[in-house]
Image: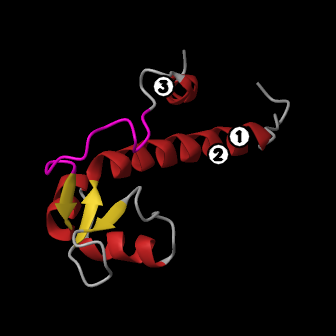
Amino acid sequence: MGPLSSCLHKLLDGDDQRSHKDHLITPTNFLNTQQAAELLRVSGSWLRQRKAKKIFKPGTHYVYSTGNIHGTLLWDVIALQEWQRNQTCQLEATSEINASRIETYCSGKD
């Protein structure tokens, strides 16, 4: 099984696939921007940019601690790690598809 098929298999496997409703909301799931960025190995501005571009969804990837826009922004690191896995699989799939479209030519000389 190649890396792409392994990745796709994990995505399609019901045991590995979790939605935001499948895990309990605990203090360890939701971290502030600095903590989430450190855990995910990204910057805080990277998280905020994707929130602003509506790549990350409210209630799925982040919540406001007080329930209003002035509350502390908390990030669901489990949902964000899932997003990272999905994006990685999509990138790998795109790379393999593009590579398969490249024609190779032989000069005829051995």
Residue 6 has which mark? none
Of callouts 3 and 2, the N-terminal one: 3
Mark 3–mark 2 distance (CA, rounded to whole Å) = 17 Å
Looking at the rendered structure, the secondary structure element under dot 3 is helix
Q: Residue furthest bottom?
A: 70
Q: Which residue is mark 1?
A: 97
| Residue 1: x %, y % from top left | 54, 14
Q: Amino acid at mark 3?
A: Lys
The magenta stretch spans residue 33: no
Give the side of residue 84 with respect to residue 6, left or right: left
Q: Quadrant of residue 65?
A: bottom left
| Residue 50: x %, y % from top left | 43, 71
Q: Amino acid at mark 1?
A: Ile
Q: Nearer the viewer, residue 106 or 27?
A: 27
- Local crowd at mark 2 within 10 Å, few (<14), some, or many (≥20)? few
Give the side of residue 79 with respect to residue 104, left or right: left
Mark 2–mark 1 distance (CA, rounded to whole Å) = 5 Å
Q: Which residue is mark 2?
A: 94
Q: Which residues are magenta?
A: 18-29
Marks 2 and 1 close (CB-CB < 8 Å): yes
Could you tell me which quadrant the C terminus lies in? Answer: top right
Instruction: Please give the name of the residue rendered at 85% of the width and 30% of the height, measured from the top-left corner.
Output: 108
Q: Which residue is mark 3?
A: 10
